[in-house]
Structures are given as structure tokens and as C-alpha cells.
Image (spheres, grey):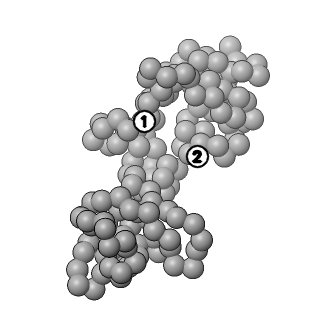
Amino acid sequence: MAEVKSGDMVSIEYSCATADGEVFLTTEGDAPFKFITGGGQVMPGLEQAVIGMEVGNTLTAEIDPELAFGQPDPDQMVLMDLDQFPDDIDLELGDAVEITMPGEEGQVNAIIKEMSIDGVLVDANHPLAGEVILIEITLLKILNA
């Protein structure tokens, strides 16, 4: 039976969870997910996990942060003045806000981590940065085999 190799287009079903078992992304109830291995389209840990799989196989992989959403980057933590936020917004800890990072163009999503008289500390890291990800994968097809 054929095994997945780099450059193959695959069709999978998957379920991603945090280390404590909280599922945050799944194909359950949706169409299977297709991607080309080695193409940089998905997190590196997912690509590595499917390499060598055979059609019909299911595996569970533990993906370290470096191969998932990365480690938290201190440069993505920014202290902003309150006057940089619209007056009509009620800011609270844990709220998601859109900000423009210093020296960059465009908006990014961030989470309010701290509030003080000095300003608002926001975190633009991916919410799962630093987390080990558990992913269960079932290989449905190798589409170019």
C-alpha cells in the first residue's frame, strides 16, 4: 500500500486539541481537509505526522509548540496608550481587539492582558503560542497516487 511522501496531495479528517483535551478545530461534520505535504500550507507538525501514513490509518500526534503555533514572541506584546482605542469601547481583560502594531501596516488581532494607568498591554501572539497540540488524523486518500 502507498505511503504519503512529501509533495503528495492528501485528504484527511482531523481533530486538534490542547494538551488538556479541549478540542479547538475539527473536520467532524465538515468536508475532509486537503493539502499538499511539504507545501507549507499547514503547521509543520501536521505535515510531518502524515508523512509515511497509509490510507485508512489513524494516528494521534503530540505536536510541540515550535511545530505548531510557535513560542510566544515578546515583540508581539505591546503597551498601548488608552487614547489609541476608540472612546466608545469598554475595554476589559481578555477582550479581543484589533490593533496596528508599531512600525507595521494593517490590523492584527490581539488580547488585552493587563490594564493600568500606564496603558493597555495587548498580546498579538497566536492564542495557542507555546501550547503542545494533540492532533488525531485519519488519512482518507492520497489524491495523486
Location of residue 58 with respect to 78 vertically, above or below: above
Residue 108, image x and y in percent?
A: 50, 62
- How dense is the environment of label 2, judged by Cα within 10 Å: few (below 14), some, or many (20 and up)? some
- At 39% from the left and 55% from the top, the residue drawn is 127
Can I make out residue 52 in this image?
no
Give left or right: position of 55 versus 24: right
Q: Nearer the viewer, mark 2 or mark 1?
A: 1
User: Residue reaching furthest front?
Assistant: 88
Q: Say which element carries label 2.
A: helix
Looking at the rendered image, the quarter that the N terminus falls into is top right
* Whole-percent x, y for residue 52 in the image: 63, 28
Horizontal arrangement in the rendering, residue 11 relative to residue 81 (left or right): right
Q: Is residue 55 above or below residue 68?
A: above
**Looking at the picture, does residue 113 appear above or below residue 35?**
below
Image mark for residue 25? 1
Residue 94 shows which numbered tag?
none
Q: Which residue is mark 2?
A: 44
Q: Which residue is more in the foreground, 11 or 66?
A: 11
Pointer 1 local density, CA inside 10 Å: few below 14, some 14–19, many at least 20? few
Amino acid under disc 1: Leu
